[in-house]
Every structure is written in C-alpha cells, then in structure tokens.
Amino acid sequence: MIMIAGPCAVETATDTYKIAEELSKYDKQIILRGGCWKPRTKPDSFQGLGEVGVDILVAAYELYELRGCCLEVMDKKHLDYIINHYPEKNIILQIGSRNMQNFELLKLVSSYSKEYGNTVLLKRGFGNTINEMCGARDYLQHDNVILCERGIRTLSEASRFTLDLSAVPVLQQKTGCRVIVDPSHAAGEKSLVPGLARAGIAAGADGLEIEVKSASAKCPRKCDEAQALPMDEFYILAHLCEDIDKLLKK
Ligand code: PEP
Ligand code: MN
C-alpha cells in the first residue's frame, strides 16, 4: 500500500522534522508530503516556503529514513530547482487538482520525469471528468504515474468536496495506473477523514495521501488546519487501512 503523509505545507524546519520523526516511528515506508509552493485561493494566504521548503522536506525524509517525499510543482522554476539540487533523491512530483489540465505543465513534468526518473502523482481536477483525467494522464508519457482521487464538486455540501469512489476502479481499469485516494481534501474536516480513507482502501485504492499534524502541535497550521489528522489518530487509521488492504488481498 502506498502511504503519502505529512503536513499540507512545509511551515518550519522544526515542525516538519517532528512530523517526519513521528511518521518514521510508525513505518519508514511512508512518503513524506509537504507543499512548498502552495496554490492558494487568496493572495494574502500563506504561499509556502518555496525553495527553502524543499530543502527542509528532503532533509527531513532523509534524516528519518523515510521512503521519499512528495511535493506539488506548478512551474518550470520549481522543476529546475528540484532537479538541479536533488537529482538523486526520491521526490514524487505532484500535479495538483488546479493544474490537472495545465497542458504545458503536464508536458514539462512528463519530460523531466522521463529524464530523471521521478514518479508523478496526478491529482484529479475537482471539476473534471474521468475521461479528462485519462487525457491528462496521457500527457505524462511514461509508466511511473500514480493517479489520485481527491474529491469533486457536487451538490453535496456535507463535506469540502465529494469523494468519487467509483473513480478508483474505473481509473484502474482504464489506465492500468495505481490509484490512490486523498481523503483529507475531500473531507475538509478531520473527523471525516478516517471514514473516507477506509472506504477508499475498501474500494480497492492502491494507497492514500493524508494530511497530518504532530501529536505535540500547539499552533494552528497555516494551511488546511481543519483537516489535519493528529498523529495518534493517523496511527490508528493507518493500521485499520492496512488490515482492510490485507483482507482484500487474501
Ligand atoms: C495538496 O495535496 O497539497 C493539494 C493542494 O491538493 P489538491 O491539489 O488536491 O487540492
Ligand atoms: Mn492541503
């Protein structure tokens, strides 16, 4: 099972190291996520630490011997920084929901990941169909692509977005790619995250991307605080999801 976990955004070195340490105590196979360039709705919201954030994220995953890290890229400058500074590291290049149909970005990420071997995590646009996602996947002309269902806009106001679980088997069948579920952005609220995560694995997802915060965190996070799962709750959830996954593979 692929497990990508970490803060919404890299905020400080201390906080990121703490989260990496806590995740590593659970399982060193976890991939540490953390946005460094954040696509925020409003310009006065925290925009991420940029290049410094990448340095922190890579150092944190290495120090605690996690499997790798994952961050969103939106621009050629971001790709150049990652490739020039960390050509040998295990860095998953995430294409966010808001950029699923940014075709020039898709072409750029495709050529970088082909040349340097990075895995690409393509998230579904929250207003996009499965066919549009398949088209976006086709722009990434190599095999190392993971798709992510993260919720779409519907009439429901019960959660931030509506997790479209049928996307999991449909995308697996149509693309042959591994498909993971992001319950955090779908839920928008931490009490809803465990149920959606468990349902995602039960639907056959190949893994999860979950936003977490340290057990000892005191300040609210600058980004997506409401959906950040406290670490003790993450441990319980990760265990349960592994059990469900094992049961399905029996
Ligand atoms: C994220 O994973 O950091 C993120 C912004 O998610 P999405 O693109 O799905 O909104
Ligand atoms: Mn987030």
Image (cartoon, grey):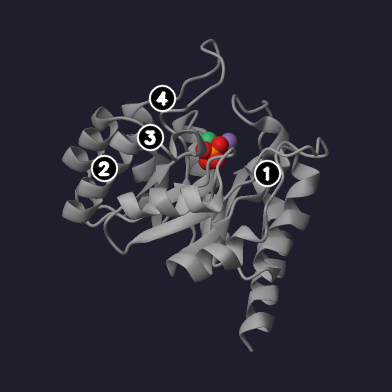
State the count of labels. 4
Q: Nearer the viewer, mark 1 or mark 4?
A: 1
Quarter residue 48 falls in: top left
Q: Amino acid at mark 3?
A: Asn
Q: CA distance from mark 3 to mark 2?
A: 9 Å
Secondary structure under the numbered disc 2 in the rendered image: helix
| Structural crowding at the residue carrying mark 2, measured as other residues with C-alpha within 10 Å and reported as few (<14), some (14–19) or many (≥20) | some
Question: What is the spatial separation of the Cα atoms under label 1 and label 4, in whole angstroms?
Answer: 24 Å
Q: Name the spot of residue 143 as percent of width and height, x first.
A: 31, 64
The crowd level at tag 1 (other Cα within 10 Å; few <14, some 14-19, many 20+) is many
Residue annotated with mark 4: 49
Specify the label residue 44 is tagged with. none
Residue 215, horizontal then vertical, whole percent? 68, 44
Nearer the N terminus, badge 1 or badge 4?
4
Residue displayed at 52% across by 46% down: 124
Residue under circle 1?
186
Q: Which mark is residue 102?
A: 3
Task: Determine whether the residue tagged by mark 3 lies in a helix, strand or loop.
Answer: loop
Q: Which image quarter holds the C terminus?
A: bottom right
Secondary structure of the residue carrying numbered label 4: loop
Identify the residue shown where x is 40% and y is 51%.
135
The residue under label 4 is which amino acid type? Leu
15 sits left or right of 204 in the view = left
- In the figure, residue 235 lies in which quadrant? bottom right
Q: Amino acid at mark 1?
A: Ala
Mark 3 crowdedness (10 Å alpha carbons): few <14, some 14-19, many ≥20: some
* Residue 130: % across, % down: 54, 53
Tag 2 residue:
107
The residue tagged with tag 1: helix, strand or loop? helix
**First in residue order: circle 4 vs circle 2:** 4
